[in-house]
């Protein structure tokens, strides 16, 4: 497996930096450009959720094993994200986890020391 991690700093440009880190890593690993945009959307949503809804450290982990990419964001809150049952057209939030679900082959959460990890798996490279 190929693995890379990045500590997300709580800055206004944090999501942009997370996307840049992800793009560079995936290109280094030879992931086709056609697969990268969807991954970047997932990274944006997971990192944004962690920064908006939690305090403390946030870490982005990327793992590539046999054509499956796992994007995982760990934060210091034990509270798992809630998938909304309905969202009005005028709502300004609440769609992030629905986007992650739509773009992922599978996704979920798991407890980690001091918080949780929200992860998504995406087939890449025709895998």
Image (spheres, helix red, strand yellow):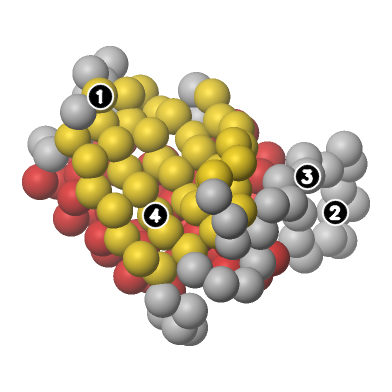
Residue where numbered disc 1 is placed? 65
Q: Nearer the viewer, mark 2 or mark 1?
A: 1
Nearest the viewer among 7 and 91 is 7
* Quadrant assignment, res 38: top left
Q: For the view shown, which residue lies furthest in the bottom direction?
A: 12
Tell me the quarter of the image containing the C terminus: top left
* Residue at mark 2 to residue at mark 1: CA–CA distance: 38 Å
Q: Residue at x 85, y 53 (%)?
A: 89
Q: Mark 4 near mark 1, Cβ–Cβ under 8 Å?
A: no
Q: Mark 2 near mark 1, Cβ–Cβ under 8 Å?
A: no
Callout 2: SS:
loop
* Residue at mark 3 to residue at mark 2: CA–CA distance: 18 Å
Q: For the view shown, which residue lies furthest in the front direction?
A: 113
Where residue 43 sits in the image (x, y, percent)? 44, 52
Residue where numbered disc 4 is placed? 60
Q: Residue at x 50, y 53 (%)?
A: 74
Nearest the viewer among 42 and 73 is 73
Residue where numbered disc 3 is placed? 82
Work out whether residue 41 can be spotted: no
Residues packed near mark 3 inside 10 Å, few (<14), some (14 to 19) or many (20 plus)? few
Q: Earlier in the sequence, mark 4 or mark 2?
A: 4
* Quadrant assignment, res 15: bottom left
Work out whether residue 112 can be spotted: yes
Residues packed near mark 4 inside 10 Å, few (<14), some (14 to 19) or many (20 plus)? many
* Residue at mark 4 to residue at mark 2: CA–CA distance: 31 Å
* Residue at mark 3 to residue at mark 4: CA–CA distance: 20 Å
Callout 1: SS:
strand
Residue where numbered disc 2 is placed? 89
* Residue at mark 4 to residue at mark 1: CA–CA distance: 17 Å
* Residue at mark 3 to residue at mark 1: CA–CA distance: 28 Å
Q: Residue at x 54, y 24 (%)?
A: 106
């Amino acid at each position: 497996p190929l693995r890379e991690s990045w500590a997300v700093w709580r800055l206004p440009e944090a999501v942009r930096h997370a996307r840049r880190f992800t793009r560079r890593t995936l290109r280094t690993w030879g992931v086709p450009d056609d697969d990268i945009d969807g991954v970047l959307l997932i990274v944006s949503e997971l990192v944004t959720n962690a920064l908006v809804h939690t305090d403390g450290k946030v870490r982005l982990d990327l793992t590539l094993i046999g054509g499956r990419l796992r994007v995982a964001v760990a934060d210091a809150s034990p509270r798992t994200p809630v998938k909304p049952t309905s969202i009005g057209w005028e709502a300004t939030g609440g769609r992030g986890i629905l986007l992650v679900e739509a773009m992922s082959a599978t996704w979920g959460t798991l407890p980690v020391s001091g918080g949780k990890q929200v992860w998504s798996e995406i087939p890449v490279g025709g895998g």
